[in-house]
Image (tube, coloured by chain):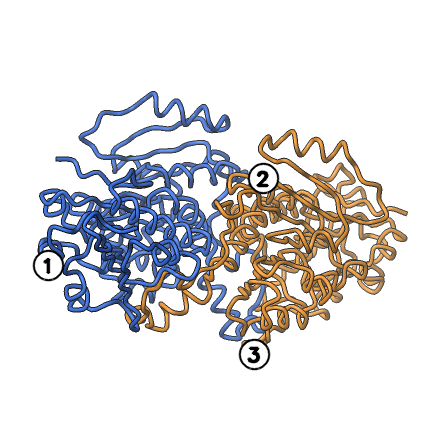
Chain colours: A orange, B blue
Amino acid sequence: MSTSSGKKYKIVVTQDLGKDVMPILLDRPDFEVVVWHGTGPCPRSWLLENAVGASGLVVLLGNKMNAETFDTAGPSLKVVSTMSVGYDHVDLDALSQRGIRLGHTPDILTDAVADISVMLALMASRNAKQTAHIVENGEWPTSVWAPYLFCGPQISSSWIKPTPTVGFIGFGRIAQATLSRLIPFGYTHCLYTTNPTSPRDTAFESGILEKHPTLKEVKRVDLYSLAKESDVVFVLAPGGDKTRHIVNETFLKSMKKTAVLVNTSRGTLVDSDALAKALKEGWIWGAGLDVVEGEPNVGADHPLVKEPRCIVLPHIGSATNETRLGMATLTAKNLVAGVLGEDMPAEYKVSK
Amino acid sequence: MSTSSGKKYKIVVTQDLGKDVMPILLDRPDFEVVVWHGTGPCPRSWLLENAVGASGLVVLLGNKMNAETFDTAGPSLKVVSTMSVGYDHVDLDALSQRGIRLGHTPDILTDAVADISVMLALMASRNAKQTAHIVENGEWPTSVWAPYLFCGPQISSSWIKPTPTVGFIGFGRIAQATLSRLIPFGYTHCLYTTNPTSPRDTAFESGILEKHPTLKEVKRVDLYSLAKESDVVFVLAPGGDKTRHIVNETFLKSMKKTAVLVNTSRGTLVDSDALAKALKEGWIWGAGLDVVEGEPNVGADHPLVKEPRCIVLPHIGSATNETRLGMATLTAKNLVAGVLGEDMPAEYKVSK
C-alpha cells in the first residue's frame, strides 16, 4: 500500500514512543518513518531538516509547531500528533490556516493526575517532606515524642471539622475525578471557579450532587470566596494569559491558615514569589506542586524548593506506565488516522 | 470536693497534654496533679518516685506499666490512662490482678491513619521520594524528558488494569476506612486476612459489599493468595508475637513485581531485611512505611531508609492536630472517669 502517487507517506517522530507502540507506525508498508534517536530532545534543526515533505509529525511539548515548521514540511503535511493534552507549543492559527489537523491525548491522563493531586494534598498537610527528611537525615533516633509533634491539619473530616470544603480552580474532568476521590475523606462541600464569562450551569451542579449522595453543596463561586472557604484548594485550570498568576498574594492572603494549595495543572497559574511568601509567613499551611513557573529551570535554591512545607515534584502528573503507554498509543493512532484522512480517536478541533 | 477521707486524688501525668486539654485535670478541686515538665520523656525514676499513692496515671507508649509500677503506686491506683490505641507497654495480667482499669484511645485516630495509608501507597507507586529528591538536588533543569521517565505503576484503575485488587493484612476499622478511600480509585476487589483461628464471617463481607456498590469481591484469604493477587498490600494488624514478621521473604516473593506494600501499624510485622532485599532485587515495586522494626532507632544508614523506592516516615500516622487533640482529650476524660469509678469513654477491658 502507498499513496495514490505510489510514494510512501513520510512520518517524522521526534521521540521514540517505546517498543509497545512504535510498531503501530513502523509496521505500516505505506509509511516511511524517520525517528529521532539522539540523546535528549530532538534539535530544532533536525526537525526542520527532516520535516520537508512529511505527511505527519509526532511531537512533544518541547517541539515548536509554528508557521516555519508547517511551511518547511510543505503542503504534504496533514497532521500534527502531540503526545500531550496541552497545545501551548502549537500555533493554532497557523495550523488551521493550512488545513492541518491536530491530535492530542486528553482524558487518558485524568486518573493519573487526579491520583497525584490527592497525594500532594495529603503530603502537604501531613508534613511528608519535613518528616521524611527527619528520617533521611538520621534524626529519628533522637527526636523526642510530644503530643503535637509533626502535627498538621487533618485532610479528612474530624470531630473538630466534620464538614470540610474543597475548592477547585477549574472544574473539568481531572477536578471532578479528584473530587470523587475526596468524597470518602468526608468532604461535604465543593466550591469551584470556571471561566467567568460562561453562565453558571446549575443542571451540571445537580448532576455532581446526584453522583455523590454525601455531598451537600457544589457551587460556582468567585475566587475570593473559594480562597476564603476552602480547606484545600486544587489548581486544575488551563494555562495561558487568562489564568496567569490567578493564585497571587491577594488569593493566598484570603486562604485559611490551615489550608493547603495543590497545583497539578500549569506552573503559570501560581505566582511563585507570592506562594513562597505565604508559606514563609504562615498565611497557609502548605503546598504541593507538580508544576512550577519556568520549569524545568527550577533549581535546588528555588524559594519554593527550600520551603519545608512545599512539596515540589518534577511534573510527573501523568507519569504512570499505564497512562504514558496509553498516551503514546493514542498519539500513534491519531497520527495514522490523520494521515489517512480518517476519524481521529482524539482530534483537537481548532475553532475559527 | 475531695475523696471520702478528705484527701485529694493524686494524679501523675508523664506528658503535658497541651493547654486545651490540661484544664480537664487541673481545674478539678478534687485532683492533685503532678506533671512531668522536663525535656523529653519522663525518666522511670521520676515516674516511680511520684507514683507513690497515686489514684491515676496518664501515660504514653514509652512508660512501662508493670507490676513494679503498680506496686509502687500502691492500692490507691484505680486507673491507667494511656494516650495511645496500643497497650504493648502495659502488663495486662499484672493490671487486672490488681483490679486497675485501663483507658486508651481507639477509633479517634482511624481517619488520620487511613489518610496516611493512602498517601504512602500513592507515594510508593508514584516514585515520590526519588522525584522529590531530583528537584531538591537541583537535577530538574538537566533531566531529559522521555515518555516513560519517572513512571511507576498506576494505583488507580486504568485501561490496562481496569479491576485492581487491594489486600489488607488485618481488616479492622483503619483497614475498612482505607478501603472506603480506595473505592473511587477504581478498586473492585478486596482481599484480607485476619486471625486464622476465627471463622470467616460472610455476613460481615456482605455488609462491606453493600456499603460499596462498585466493589465486586470482599474475601478472606490465606496470606499467600493475598500476596499473589493484590496490587497494593496494607499491613494494618496488631503487633505482638503472633504477627511478628508476617511479611517475610516468602510473602514478598509471592507479591506482584508492580505491587506496593504499606505498613502503618507496627514495625514488627514486617521483616526489614527481607523488605530491603525485595526492593533491591525488584520483587516488588515500592514500599511506604510509617513504622519500622526497632524504631526510633532507625538511622540514615538503615537499609530501608537508603532504598530509593521506600518511603520511611517517623511514625506520624495519628499526627494531625485534630486527632492528637482528640486523643489527649479522651485520655484526660478516661482518667477522670476511672478515678471517680464512673463509665470511661474508652475503657480497654482485659479479658480474663
In the rendered view, would you say B134 is above or below B228? Answer: below
- Residue B237 percent location from the top left of the image: 28, 43
Can residue B287 be seen in the rendering of this structure?
A: no
Outermost residue, bottom side? A301
Q: Residue under label 1, please give it.
A: B72
The amino acid sitting under disc 1 is Thr
Measure the C-alpha gap from mark 1 to mark 2: 55 Å
Residues at marks 2 and 3 on the same chain: yes
In the image, what residue occupies the spot 16% across and 35% down?
B351
Which image quarter is the N terminus of chain A in? top right
Amino acid type of the residue that numbered disc 2 sits on in the rendered structure:
Ser
Q: Chain of mark 3?
A: A
Q: Indicate which disc residue A180 carries.
A: 2
Chain hosting mark 1: B
Looking at the rendered structure, the secondary structure element under dot 3 is loop
Q: Residue A289: x percent and y percent?
A: 59, 61
What residue sits 31% from the left and 37% below the top?
A: B226
Disc number lying in front (2 or 3): 2
Picture coordinates of residue A193, whole percent (x, y): 74, 49
Q: Quadrant of residue A36?
A: bottom right
Is B215 or B204 nearer to us in this picture? B204
